[in-house]
Image: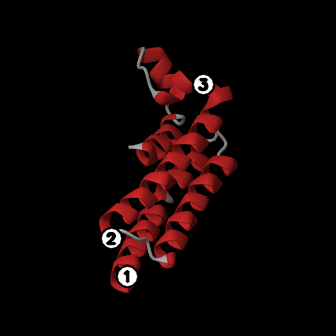
Amino acid sequence: IAWTLVYDTLYAHQDKKDDAKLGLKSTALHFGEEYTKPILYGFSTISWLGWNMAGLASVGTAHPLFLMGTTTAWSHLLWQIHTADLNDSQNLATRFKSNNTVGAIVFGSIVAGTMLS
């Protein structure tokens, strides 16, 4: 859920003016310009912790490649947030679409960690 909040909030910033006009309550409006990035850094860290806890719980130990992979995925989330321009729709769309990469890294980490444990 935490990872979803990261990419969905970045995506929601593209429509925040329309959301405000329509009276919708998006995370982009709720968090606001000032607090969006700090909150998303927190959700990214929660994602990283969740991925690693799941890896440890499923096998009892997490292979170093799994941990390296989840850390790489987390780093990618941090890059998205750091470089996000909350008022540039093109910039936000690029970051939203790059979550395919995050998913591929996490999936690859699970496969590698399972096969090598």
Q: Say what amino acid the circle numbered 1 marks.
A: Ser
Q: CA distance from mark 2 to mark 1?
A: 8 Å
Instruction: Return the mark for residue 32.
Output: 3
Q: Which residue is mark 1?
A: 117
Q: Secondary structure at mark 3?
A: helix
**Which part of the image, by quadrant, shows the C terminus?**
bottom left
Tell me the residue at 35%/68% (across/down): 60
Q: CA distance from mark 1 to mark 3?
A: 43 Å
Number of the front mark, 1 or 3: 1
Instruction: Return the mark for residue 65.
Output: none
Q: Would you identify the image quadrant in which residue 39 lies?
A: top right
Q: CA distance from mark 2 to mark 3?
A: 40 Å
Left/right of residue 107 with respect to residue 42 in the rendered view: left
Left/right of residue 87 with respect to residue 8 in the rendered view: right
Q: Would you identify the image quadrant in which residue 52 lies?
A: bottom left
Tell me the crowding category of disc 3: few under 14, some 14 to 19, or many 20 or more residues within 10 angstroms, Cα based: some
Q: Which residue is mark 2?
A: 59
Tell me the crowding category of disc 2: few under 14, some 14 to 19, or many 20 or more residues within 10 angstroms, Cα based: few
Question: Could you tell which of marks 1 and 3 lies nearer the N-terminus?
Answer: 3
* Of the pair 90 and 55, the residue shown nearer to us: 55
User: Which x, y percent locates residue 88?
Assistant: 63, 41
User: Which x, y percent locates residue 84?
Assistant: 64, 46
**Image position of 70 with respect to 31: above or below:** below
Q: Would you identify the image quadrant in which residue 35 lies?
A: top right
Question: Could you tell which of marks 2 and 1 lies nearer the N-terminus?
Answer: 2
Q: Say what amino acid the circle numbered 2 marks.
A: Val
Instruction: Please say if the residues under marks 2 and 1 sit with CB atoms less than 8 Å apart.
Output: yes
